[in-house]
Image (spheres, rainbow, N blue to C red):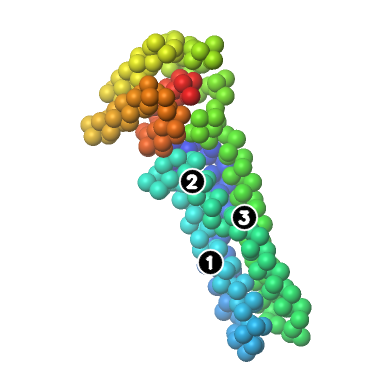
Amino acid sequence: MEIRKDLEPVSQHLQRLLTYGEVFHQNNVKEWSDLCSQQDFDKIYQLSPDDMNPLEEIYKTGRDLAVHMSQKLQAFNYAEDYPTLSSYIESLSKGWLAEIDILENISQTAKDKCSELKSYPWAIKAMLVLFDKQIDLLRSIRTTLDIMKISDLYKLENGELDMSFKYPNQTTNITNISNVSGKVNYQSEDHSVNITSSNVGQLFSDINNAIDQSNINKDEKQKLSTLVSELEKSHSKGNFKENYKKFIQDVASHIGIIAPFLPALSNLL
């Protein structure tokens, strides 16, 4: 699967998520399906509810997890749902990754029940192994998200980017940050302005010029220009930082136009 262009700075890590998603997909369509169709799996329904429920929970929860994660781990490509890397990471962090402890308890409860029983289906033993492997995958996913949280793209979206950051084909030389002053080259050529509180308007004017010269349609240009205008107003009102994050989310689908100006904008935070 091709990774959308505005997320290319973390494409290596997203590719890993796609690989994990394929594992979950195969678990769903093959592993869980095959184990469920094993004739001895049906023997759990001969047990009392107290004995059956913990064992059946391994199958139900394990397969639900596989179905959900096989879809979720490629959902970063859907800009309409996740306009930024940050929004995708946040949504993923709130799902199954936040319930690893619960999954471990489900696994341990089933293992304890198996120890109590004189005999139990072979399929359950295999399902427990598969269930635990999926928990390990969740831990690896969580680690991958933590790595992406220290990426320049994630920091940029959250207004945490160190001003020594340099966008591709762009040089940035920031001085006297405490007075919101610095020289920013928008492109590799020296078309730069000094970002001071007296010429912030020039920065936003340059952004609008870039929008006007872009290849996007008229309606999208108008939408972007409105967002830029709102961001400029927030600077004068003193709530720029709060609006900056929303601005980055709103322009995500056209980040290539705005990207050269992001270091200068983040210098205003």
Mark 1: which amino acid? Asp
Where is residue 20 shown, x and y percent of the image?
58, 53
Badge 1 or badge 3: first in the primary sequence: 1
Badge 2 or badge 3: first in the primary sequence: 2
Q: Between residues 5 and 227, which one lies in front from this camera angle?
A: 227
User: Pointer 2: residues within 10 angstroms few (<14), some, or many (20+)?
Assistant: many
User: Pointer 3: residues within 10 angstroms few (<14), some, or many (20+)?
Assistant: many
Q: CA distance from mark 2 to mark 1?
A: 20 Å
Give the residue displayed 37% in from the left and 37% down from the top: 250
Give the residue displayed 31% in from the left and 22% down from the top: 208
Q: Which mark is residue 64?
A: 1
Q: Is 252 above or below relative to 262? A: below
Mark 3: which amino acid? Leu
Visible residue check, residue 259 = no
Task: Tell me the SS state at disc 3.
Answer: helix
Give the residue displayed 44% in from the left and 32% down from the top: 242
Residue corresponding to mark 3: 138
Badge 2 or badge 1: first in the primary sequence: 1
Residue corresponding to mark 2: 88
Residue that lies at the very extreme toward the left in this rendered image: 218
Q: CA distance from mark 1 to mark 3?
A: 14 Å
CB atoms of marks 2 and 1 within 8 Å: no
